[in-house]
Image (cartoon, helix red, strand yellow):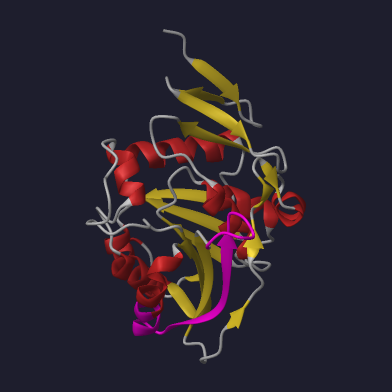
Amino acid sequence: MTTNFLLSPSGEEIMLKPGERADDLQLCGLFCIQDKNRFCFGMDAVLLSGFASVKENETCLDLGTGTGIIPLLLSAKTKGKHFTGLEIQEDSAEMAGRSVRLNGLEDKIDIVRGDIREASSVFERSSFDVITGNPPYMTDLHGLKNPAEAKAIARHEVLCSLKEFVTAAATLVRPGGRFYMVHRPFRLPEIFGELRAVRLEPKRMRLVHPYVDREPSMVLIESVRGGNPRMTIEPPLIIYEKEGIYSEEVRRDYGF
């Protein structure tokens, strides 16, 4: 069996394992290694990276980073000082680490293997300016689970509930810091309840519709730790003008 290698900017040979590919992100020459048999990133991660704001010299933690796509995108789109991805699955964390090395970003991105539920024992409390997260959309009881463990963990709350995810964010973000998440609109009442229970005040929200005449399929939310009540509802984001054709905003702002 032939093993493929790619060269990093430093000349290091980065191995691609069987079933893996290195996808061109069409942004600053970045590539992301993915495994077709595991969970690959989708539009939700791309939209979250565009919705999140990381200011100059700020630090950012991505909870459940998977392929490491959000730290990769944010490192190119923002002036943040440093980005960390936390991932519980050993294979995913190792693969994300290879993506970091492939792009020569070892000084800007760390991939840490660990459990979101125990994140406060991995990182200091209130130690990040920004937290991002693309948590599992379905509870452990919602719908049929994918027989592939990696995909089931990514889509269903097998290893981490919404409450545990939000609690970790509230513990690790500094007072006045921001938490950005993407989720499903049907869980909005629960999401708002969990956020406010840990003093993450929802401040900005945007609904994402696949087509202009369809129900929203995603919601992007910005919360501030200890923020005052008052939320801005941004205009809806429409993904497609028609089947197979991205909207002007998506093409202009998200690189499609």
Q: Nearer the viewer, residue 163 or 112?
A: 163
Does residue 88 appear anywhere in the picture? no
Q: Position of residue 194 (x, y in %)?
A: 35, 77
Picture residue at 56% right of the left edge, 84% below the top: 231
Which residue reaches farthest bottom? 228
Residue reaching furthest to the top: 1
User: Does 184 appear above or below 153?
Assistant: below
Question: How many numbered marks are there?
Answer: 0
Q: Is residue 200 above or below residue 180?
A: below
* Residue displayed at 29% across by 40% down: 146
Magenta span of residues: 193-215
Residue 45: x %, y % from top left: 53, 52
- Which quadrant is the C terminus positioned in? top right
Q: For residue 152, which quarter of the picture?
A: top left
Q: Can residue 73 be seen at all in this image of the molecule? A: yes
**Relative to residue 40, is residue 163 drawn left or right?**
left
Judged from this view, the residue extending furthest toward the left is: 141
Residue 131 in magenta stretch = no
Q: Is residue 242 above or below residue 48?
A: above
Q: Quadrant of the N terminus?
A: top left
Picture residue at 32% right of the left edge, 60% below the top:
116
* Residue 31, above or below 115: above
| Foreground pick, 113 / 137 | 137
On the image, the x and y values in percent for residue 221 come to: 52, 71
The residue shown at (56%, 65%) is 59
Left or right of residue 85, residue 232 in this image? right
